[in-house]
């Protein structure tokens, strides 16, 4: 029997079917019967023939799959026949859509995987996809199935290598990077980058590949351990490019990205060396400004621990050679810029608080909860603006606060004056407690004193960019009160929170020991604050024990805290410890899994509550599927309502880089029977979509405003307020105006509960936070997660249990401003940013107008025409009768009748209004210009551009827009219009008088001040 076959060698078995031009076989049943023939030659011929027709007759061949697989494994058969059988079975599995089984048999039929190099074949593409997916799964430690175990890892790697070579040939380096990053293979990643950075690769492809590798490594790689390995590879390859650029004096070197990589690797000494090099460079004008820009970029990330380590390694600072760099990194200059902007550009509407106060006073009785919320609302609206005029004008209203409400009201000053470190002690002097060395602490009272210590911590801790020296002074002052105020739990509470805020992230073990002493006094209120403060001091430190002695002591502390939480009977102390442990997990990812898993399995729901928030902070911004699965499972399975609530809210923290996923995830949870889950869903949507004005999110929250449970309505009000932050009146079809009116009307509605009104009051403050110049920013602009925002929101959410935690929102509020500075740190007033949208889209909301009482106008009476004719007729008749001297009674009756008729005919007529011609409405421009400095909201960033041809040009590409932009002057010889950043108390001072010469009385040039004043008035 002569059978045609195009198979020439064993390496072409898998391609012979598609390349064969054999005659179509109507049925494969005859050939299938031949594979069980006792003759080896017949079986071999049948297998060769089947391979040519399997793609058309696979449905018949599928019935013989067990026989084909047994043939492929039969050692008595020839090697060629076994490979034919495996190749046929592989193609059948391909048509059955079982690519993994097809890959298994393909690998057994061709050990060198040369089939992977073929293109344009659906079968080959399916096997390649399966091979890469299985390779990634096995490399990343995924679950190994029986099928996967039967495939040799070396063969999979051969397939991957073939695909990488194909990517190199096509210049598709990003595809090759994707394979290397997904498979967690640093060696292949380095090989891809080396291939990309070869001399034959165009520069634009090199830059695009490098940017993609960094973005994918930071945002897509879920394993922290591999991410650090990958960053080291990227940093090594990037350093070669930067060295070449420096050698050639190339001003296009991307120092900003290079420093970002080194910061992600926690290498402060490398960053300091770069900045020192730039400050002492030969190209002084350009490199010095670039060094300052790098300094501002570092501070804007919010990681002040790293910034301080960089400053300690800078030789230009240690040798006092550069005061400007010291001002940026340690002097709190960025905090001064934010404070100056919030103070000058504040658009807070004073009538909102007036109407709010009036609505609360109309109730007759005083509600301490709503009064406290109104004070907090005022602090939100004026956060960081230093504008406390309303409190000063209504001191009697403020004095209504008593006990813990007085503590909270005093602490609100810290929110209003956040970052105003230069005047902090002077502002709080009337409330601060006397020195504990001279005056023993009174066990009773101390609410205003404790609140003032808390306020001092908020002033220095709200903005990570504050002056480090001022912060240390405040921390030492608070520690003094902390050590000596154990007798008064209120003062201890305020001092502990203040110390935690001023020493946040310092990992100072002396402060930790002082807080432990307060914790072990077993005072419920003071112990809760001590537990939270411990977490703030050790935020992001983790739980693992390494060789480092400091880490060992932290590990021992964690065990101590867990044991003490099981010994104490105070729930407040347990909650403080749980939240402290949660803060320590910030940014640790899988390194915190063991401790958090232990806490999640604890019988105490409060520890499970802390573990849930710890998981959200550990994976904050990573988008980890593992963390999301755990949180969703907890949200529907835990028996504690508080734990379920924390799990739902935690989704917003994990997914803040892809916020649009949060409304989709919680859509069904908003319909849950559990009101705590519904409340948490509203808050999660608000946190994730804050400042976006997203219509879909609003449509999800709108029905919850009418929920049957009062605190669910509170959550819906707060969530909607967050979404509407910094939105104009035209947002979402002008629904924002309806929402503002709804919150205002709720305060006067006697049917609304206190919790709902509480949400309306706090929502009013959140909506206009920071003079309408602040938003909740997790760090999308700078690429790093803002620790202050994540920590501040987690602590703010604890107001559910303890109202003074409301002030922690101050940590999360981020000014959304942009300011361009020259090398002397003065801002050019002529620098412009073009916004390519209608001005109304990002305008400030319209302020309320005070209603004026309408005075009643006098209405003139108008006589009818018949009345006028009757008057004229009577006048003629009287004249005729007087001339004749006759006066009859009839005439008197006629006169009387006429007068009555006259009165009945008169009518009132409204005055005619003058006709006003309406002006034709002008078309709104499609773009507008923003002056320096300016507000740029989160939604506005994508619309803003900078003209590169204007006089002042950014030192580097200002993407994303916002923050501090260092500029160069293209016309240095021309006159400049520059502004200087001043502290708020200096902004309010009157201008000095113009120069003049004084002459005494009796001198010929003496000017009488009284006469001069009268002359000025006459003019």
Image: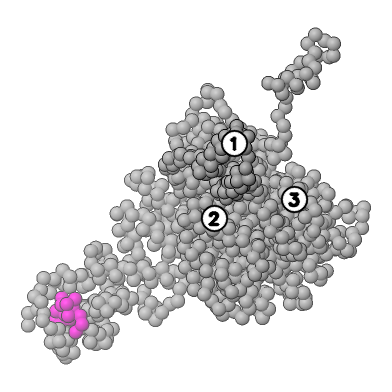
Q: Is residue 50 part of the magenta span, yes or no?
A: yes
Answer few, some or many: residues within 10 Å of disc 3's Cα (few below 14, many 20 plus, some between 14 and 19): some
- For the C terminus, which image quadrant? top right
Q: Earlier in the sequence, mark 3 or mark 1?
A: 3
Q: Position of residue 958 (x, y in %)?
A: 49, 43
State the residue position of label 2.
737
* Front residue of this view, candidates 106 and 951: 951
- The label shown at residue 798 is none
Seen at 27% across and 79% down, the residue is 96
User: Which stretch appears magenta?
Assistant: 45-60
Secondary-structure class at tag 3? helix
Q: Secondary structure at mark 1?
A: helix
Q: Which mark is residue 881?
A: 1
- Residue at x-position 44% and y-position 33%: 949
Q: At 52% across and 51% down in the image, what residue appears?
A: 729
Residue beneath disc 3: 391
Q: Main secondary structure of the magenta part?
A: helix
Q: Earlier in the sequence, mark 1 or mark 2?
A: 2
- What crowding class fits label 1: few (fewer than 14 Cα within 10 Å), some (14-19), or many (20 or more)? some
Q: Establish if 343 lies above or below 161.
A: above
Which of the 4 quarters of the picture holds residue 603?
bottom right
**Considering only vertical position in the picture, is 62 above or below 928?**
below
Q: Please name which of the two marks, 1 or 2, marks the residue nearer to the observer.
A: 1
């Amino acid at each position: 029997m002569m059978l045609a076959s195009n198979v020439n060698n064993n390496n072409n078995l898998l391609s012979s079917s598609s390349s064969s031009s054999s005659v179509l076989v109507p049925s494969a049943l005859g050939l299938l019967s031949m594979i069980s023939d006792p003759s080896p030659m017949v079986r071999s011929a049948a297998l060769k023939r089947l391979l040519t027709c399997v793609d058309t007759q696979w449905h018949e061949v599928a019935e013989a799959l067990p026989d084909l697989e047994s043939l492929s494994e039969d050692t008595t058969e020839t090697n060629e026949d076994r490979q034919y059988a495996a190749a046929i079975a592989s193609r059948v599995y391909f048509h059955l859509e079982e690519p993994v089984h097809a890959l298994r048999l393909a690998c057994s039929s061709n050990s060198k995987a040369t089939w992977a190099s073929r293109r344009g074949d659906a079968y080959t593409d399916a096997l390649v996809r399966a091979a890469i997916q299985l390779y990634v799964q096995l490399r990343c430690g995924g679950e190994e199935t029986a099928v996967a175990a039967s495939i040799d890892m070396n063969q999979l790697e051969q397939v991957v290598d073939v695909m990488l070579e194909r990517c190199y040939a096509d210049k598709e380096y990003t595809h090759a990077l994707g394979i290397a990053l997904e498979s967690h293979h640093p060696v292949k990643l380095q090989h891809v980058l080396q291939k990309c950075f070869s001399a034959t690769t165009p520069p634009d492809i090199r830059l695009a590949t490098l940017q993609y590798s960094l973005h994918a490594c930071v945002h897509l790689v879920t394993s922290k351990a591999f991410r650090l390995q990958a960053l080291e590879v990227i940093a090594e390859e990037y350093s070669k490019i930067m060295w070449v650029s420096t050698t050639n004096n190339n001003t296009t070197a991307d120092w900003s990205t290079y420093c970002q990589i080194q910061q992600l690797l926690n290498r402060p000494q490398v960053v300091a060396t770069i900045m020192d090099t730039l400050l002492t460079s030969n190209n002084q004008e350009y490199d010095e400004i670039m060094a300052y820009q790098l300094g501002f970029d570092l501070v804007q990330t919010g990681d002040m621990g790293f910034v301080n380590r960089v400053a300690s390694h800078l030789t230009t600072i240690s040798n006092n050679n550069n005061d400007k760099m010291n001002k940026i990194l340690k002097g709190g200059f960025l905090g001064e810029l934010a404070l100056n902007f919030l103070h000058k550009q504040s658009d807070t509407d004073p009538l909102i608080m007036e109407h709010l106060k009036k609505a609360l006073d109309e109730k007759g009785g005083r509600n301490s909860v709503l009064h406290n919320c109104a004070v907090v609302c005022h602090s939100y609206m004026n956060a960081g603006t230093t504008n406390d005029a309303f409190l000063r004008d209504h001191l009697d209203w403020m004095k209504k606060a008593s006990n813990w409400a007085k503590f909270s009201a005093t602490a609100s000053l810290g929110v209003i004056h956040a970052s105003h470190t230069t005047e902090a002690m002077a502002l709080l002097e009337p409330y601060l407690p006397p020195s504990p060395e001279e005056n023993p602490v009174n066990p009773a009272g101390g609410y205003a004193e404790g609140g003032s210590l808390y306020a001092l911590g908020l002033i220095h801790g709200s903005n990570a960019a504050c002056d480090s020296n001022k912060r240390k002074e405040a921390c030492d002052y608070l520690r003094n009160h902390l050590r000596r105020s154990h007798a008064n739990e209120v003062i201890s509470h305020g001092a502990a929170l203040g110390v935690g805020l001023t020493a946040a992230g310092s990992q100072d073990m002396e402060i930790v020991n002082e807080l432990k002493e307060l914790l072990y006094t077993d005072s419920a209120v003071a112990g809760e604050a001590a537990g939270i403060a411990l977490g703030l001091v050790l935020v992001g430190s983790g739980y693992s024990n390494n060789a480092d002695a400091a880490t060992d002591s932290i590990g021992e502390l964690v065990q101590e805290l867990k044991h003490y939480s099981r010994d104490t009977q105070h729930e407040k102390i347990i909650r403080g410890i749980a939240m402290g442990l949660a803060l320590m997990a910030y940014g640790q990812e899988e390194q915190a899994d063991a401790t958090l898993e232990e806490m999640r399995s604890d019988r105490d729901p409060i520890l499970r509550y802390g573990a849930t928030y710890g998981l959200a902070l550990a994976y904050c911004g990573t988008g980890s599927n593992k963390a999301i699965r755990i949180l969703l499972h907890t949200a529907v399975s835990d028996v504690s309502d508080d734990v379920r609530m924390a799990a739902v809210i935690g989704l917003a923290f994990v997914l803040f880089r892809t916020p649009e996923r949060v409304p989709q995830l919680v859509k069904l949870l908003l319909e849950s029977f559990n009101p705590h889950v519904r409340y948490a869903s509203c808050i999660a949507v608000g946190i994730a979509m804050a400042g976006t004005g997203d219509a879909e999110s609003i449509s999800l929250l709108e029905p919850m405003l009418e929920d049957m449970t009062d605190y669910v309505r509170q959550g819906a009000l707060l969530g909607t307020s967050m979404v509407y932050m910094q939105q104009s009146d035209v947002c979402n079809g002008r629904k924002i105006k309806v929402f503002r009116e709804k919150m205002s009307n709720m305060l006067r509605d006697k049917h609304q509960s206190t919790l709902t009104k509480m949400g309306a009051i706090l929502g009013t403050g959140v909506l206009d936070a920071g003079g309408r110049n602040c938003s909740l920013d997790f760090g999308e602009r700078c690429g790093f997660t803002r620790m202050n925002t994540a920590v501040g929101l987690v602590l703010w959410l604890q107001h559910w249990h303890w109202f003074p935690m409301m002030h922690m929102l101050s940590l999360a509020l981020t000014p959304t401003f942009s300011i361009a500075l020259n090398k002397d740190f003065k801002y050019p007033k002529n620098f412009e940013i073009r916004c390519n949208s209608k001005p109304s889209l990002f305008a400030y909301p319209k302020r309320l107008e005070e209603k004026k009482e309408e005075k009643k106008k006098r209405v003139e009476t108008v006589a009818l025409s018949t009345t006028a004719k009757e008057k004229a007729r009577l006048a003629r008749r009287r004249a005729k009768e007087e001339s004749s001297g006759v006066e009859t009674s009839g005439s008197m009756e006629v006169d009387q009748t006429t007068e009555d008729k006259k009165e009945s005919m008169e009518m009132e007529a409204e005055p005619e209004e003058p006709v006003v011609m309406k002006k034709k409405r002008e078309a709104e421009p499609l773009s507008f210009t923003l002056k320096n400095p300016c507000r740029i909201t989160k939604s506005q960033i994508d619309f803003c551009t900078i003209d590169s041809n204007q006089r002042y040009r950014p030192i580097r590409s200002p993407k994303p827009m916002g923050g501090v932009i260092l500029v160069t002057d293209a016309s240095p010889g021309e006159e400049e219009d520059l502004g200087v950043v001043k502290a708020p108390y200096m902004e309010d001072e009157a201008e000095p008088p113009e120069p003049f010469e004084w002459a005494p009385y009796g001198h010929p040039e003496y000017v009488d001040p009284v006469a001069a004043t009268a002359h000025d008035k006459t003019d």
